[in-house]
Amino acid sequence: MIVEIIEKVRRKESLTKEEIEIFLNGYLKGAVKDYQMSAFLMAVCCNGISKEEIFSFVDCYIQSGKQLHFLQGDTLVDKHSTGGVGDKTTLVIVPIMSALQIPVIKMSGRGLGLTGGTIDKLESIPGYQVYRSEQEMMDQVSKIGVVVCSTTEDITPLDQKTYALRDVTGTVSSIPLIAISIMSKKIAGGAKNFVFDMKYGEGALLKTKEESEKLGDIMKEIANFYHCKTDFLYSDMSHPLGYAIGNRLEVLEAMAVLQGKMKGELLETSISLASKMFMLVKNVTEEEAIQKVKEVIENKTAWNKFQEWISYQGGDIEKIKIEAKRIPYYAKQSGVITNIHAKEIALAAKALGTGREKMDDSIDPSSGIYLLKKEGESIKEGEILAYLYTNKETIPSLDSCFEIKNM
């Protein structure tokens, strides 16, 4: 039966819901072996699957573990980014939403590969507790309106087991499998409203906007099937978002935005995403949503909520220190910066200590890169273009990260 199911996918024949359940549940229980699942995933990756099959996959993933239910379910809002270099918008958006009286429960993960995940960033804050039981989540969201914690092992365990295999079999980039993985976790997490920041470009998993939009379309269909509301922001991740790349550096940059000390792309992207989240729940115009979001930033209500949230989960922002050597990188020529390559910056930051190859690898929370200039700005030869932070002896070159045009 198992081999027959694999052969059906290979022949581009549709599977029944029963066949999908037999195969996926068999894998979770150990009856289906890794090599069989690898063949199955590669067949799905190469040939695709139908909309009906996608819905059956999602249902199996959700049913494989615990599903959370909160009293605020219909008003709970969650944001998910498909990942990018320097993407710390969650740290800005979550306190904004809570300041607007919209509850947020967000379960996030650690980074694998080039960049750190949201949990890595939060764990870089001394004392921050990333683990929360279901009851603790309920109590916290009722009291302060926000909780951001690590994904628990009993939420979609089938996805967790399958993703680990996808990561080592070259099937991570399958658009249907990405959609299934994201949406099953989100729906099992208990929220009913989702805003997705869909990244594309050289620093993202998907390289083109067309691929990103295709993924968004599938995710929207899944959300509609489960009676959830969604909105999407599509953004180019060919260059880093903001100035900081590295967990503790990114926390400090997010704090500066909430304190009103920093303008620019990170602030504008965060306002766009937060406005979409507000519109989903409150059913107001975009203009009204943007006004409300800007108001809680400008009057520091969002900054106060950030401090309350971090403190409630044990974090102490007063103890955040960059405990690494600071090494300046000087411009090799004068001109205008025409491009900062996100992938090259991420590779350099990883070499400094920000990334991991395996989930149990350790990372240096103080390591990273801080840019002093962005695209379109002029630079003089010998001027400091960026700072590198590391406790390692070997320092990577940033020469391939920047394109500078002589004027």
Image (cartoon, helix red, strand yellow):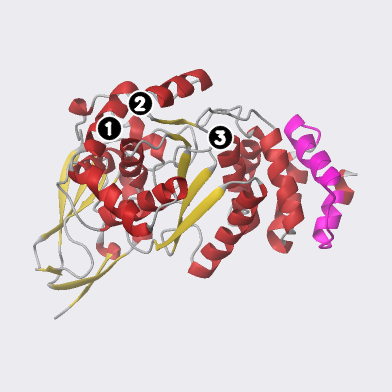
Quick one: 57 or 7, which is closer to the camera?
57
Q: CA distance from mark 3 to mark 2?
A: 19 Å
Amino acid identity at mark 2: Ile
User: Which numbered disc, 1 or 2, marks the residue that appears first in the sequence?
Assistant: 2
Residue 393 visible in the shown view: no
What residue is shown with label 3? 189
Residue 343 on the magenta segment: no
Q: Secondary structure at mark 2?
A: helix
Amino acid identity at mark 1: Lys
Q: CA distance from mark 1 to mark 2?
A: 8 Å
In this picture, residue 254 sits left or right of residue 8: left
User: Which numbered disc, 3 or 2, marks the residue that appears first in the sequence?
Assistant: 2
Q: Pointers 3 and 2 in contact (CB under 8 A)?
A: no
Q: Quadrant of the N terminus?
A: top right
In this picture, residue 397 sits left or right of residue 12: left
**Image point (61%, 49%), residue name:** 223
What residue is shown with label 2? 144
Q: Pointers 1 and 2 in contact (CB under 8 A)?
A: yes
**Image point (28%, 23%), residue name:** 311
Amino acid identity at mark 3: Gly
Q: Quadrant of the C terminus?
A: bottom left
Q: Secondary structure at mark 1?
A: helix
The residue stretch that appears in magenta? 5-31
Q: Quadrant of residue 50?
A: bottom right
Q: Pointers 3 and 1 in contact (CB under 8 A)?
A: no
Mark identifier at residue 222: none
Quick one: 250 or 92, which is closer to the camera?
92
Q: CA distance from mark 3 to mark 1?
A: 23 Å
Q: Nearer the viewer, mark 3 or mark 2?
A: 2
* Residue 330 image position (x, y, % from top left): 14, 59
Mark identifier at residue 305: 1
Classified by dominant secondary structure, the portion drawn in magenta counts as helix
